[in-house]
Amino acid sequence: MQGLKSEMLRGCWYVAATSRSLKRGKTKAKTLLGEPVVLARGEDGTAFALRDLCPHRGIPLSYGMVEGCSLRCCYHGWRFDENGTCVEIPSLAEGQKIDVAKINCGAYPCVERYGLVWVYFAANGEAPEDGPMPDVEIFPHIAPETPPAAAIMQEFDCSVDHAAFGLMDPTHAAYIHTSWWFKKNGRTLRPKEKSFEPAPFGWRMVRHALPPQNLVYKLLGDDVTTEIAYRLPGYRIEDVAGSKHSVVAVTALTPIDGQRTEVYQFFYSTMGLVKYGRPLAEYLMNVFLGQDREAVVRQREGLVWEPRLMMINDADTQARWWARIKSEWQEALAEGRSFANPLKPQTLRWRS
């Protein structure tokens, strides 16, 4: 985790796209975990994911056409269903016998929840229900059929590890996230003390009260509290809840390859009026996330020299936790056993 590249975790569900970005009858070409993937939405509205290579001549299937719930290659018209099975080879003449069902381009388990398209990358060819990662219904207070009120994605020129370190870094905001509308006087550092505890596939900052004088929080009602959870393979889930409404802010990391990462941010709320503020919310989210992106671009200039990186307590303790749970995940897969969270409850102190 010291250098430019990092290992990518398998046996996990990853966010591959927002549902609204994948149109009916259309395809979307991606590179995810170093593999060519084509997302498609059938004419019945069902999303599916295939390996983006035709096994005939190797041309990407994403150049092809969606027909029903299948994808036809643009080169010779071979057609593959949502499971990757070949269902038609137009060039076959009468009497030429070939079992086309034995030809498969490769498919990935794909589901839609929370207005997102999720793809499962198996560790050892297993089906998701037999894998180490449970289903994707992990967001509190939000029904799985609920789309995000706002959603953005930016590509970061860094490994998923360095993206994750920034995600859980509690002290960089005073120097990176300074705008006229957020931390304008960010260099004023204040002491912080937060309690943390193990959580499913990660850890969480124990729920605590938020300042009652903040006008934004008053929209959620009385006794507003927050909990921030971090979980494999790369999710930060902030749950803010009051007596009337709740808000869930999610950051999701999906590796493109060992050195590049898609960073998504989603915002959900039980307040129906929030959706009308989407353009402004997404603009501000892009500014905020863009500041993180610029930081990792600059960081990369130094990482090419392969420096030995330093971490200090307590500000960098969560980065150490990330390394520990990631190692445990890989060891559990290698040994064929269940993941065992190695973390213990702890209180951390820093200034930010």
Image (tube, rainbow, N blue to C red):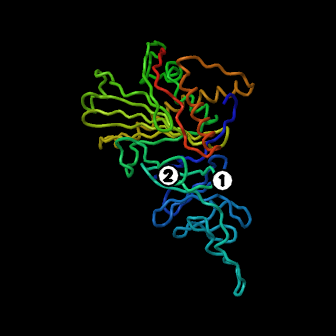
Residue 326 is left or right of residue 266, and the answer is right
The quadrant of the image that shows the N terminus is top right
The answer to which quarter of the image holds residue 257 is: top right
Q: Nearer the viewer, residue 127 or 213?
A: 127
On the image, the x and y values in percent for residue 285 come to 46, 34
Amino acid type of the residue that numbered disc 1 sits on in the rendered structure = Pro
Q: Which mark is residue 199?
A: none
- In the image as oriented, which residue stretches furthest toward the bottom? 95
Q: Residue at x 60, y 51 (%)?
A: 122
- In this picture, is 132 found above or below 205? below
Give the number of marks. Answer: 2
On the image, the x and y values in percent for residue 295 come to 59, 26
SS for tag 2? Answer: strand
- In this picture, is 31 found above or below 279? below
Q: Residue at x 44, y 51 (%)?
A: 113
Q: Label 1: which residue?
A: 36
Q: Residue at x 48, y 21 (%)?
A: 178
SS for tag 1? Answer: strand
The answer to which quarter of the image holds residue 282 is: top left
On the image, the x and y values in percent for residue 337 come to 58, 44
Crowding near the residue tagged with mark 2, few <14, some 14–19, many ≥20 C-alpha atoms within 10 Å: many
Q: Nearer the viewer, residue 308 or 203?
A: 203
On the image, the x and y values in percent for residue 214 come to 31, 23
Amino acid type of the residue that numbered disc 2 sits on in the rendered structure = Val
Gap in Å between the C-alphas at discs 1 and 2? 16 Å
Say whether disc 1 or disc 2 marks the residue closer to the N-terminus: 1
Q: Label 2: which residue?
A: 117
Crowding near the residue tagged with mark 1, few <14, some 14–19, many ≥20 C-alpha atoms within 10 Å: some
- In this picture, is 46 found above or below 100? above
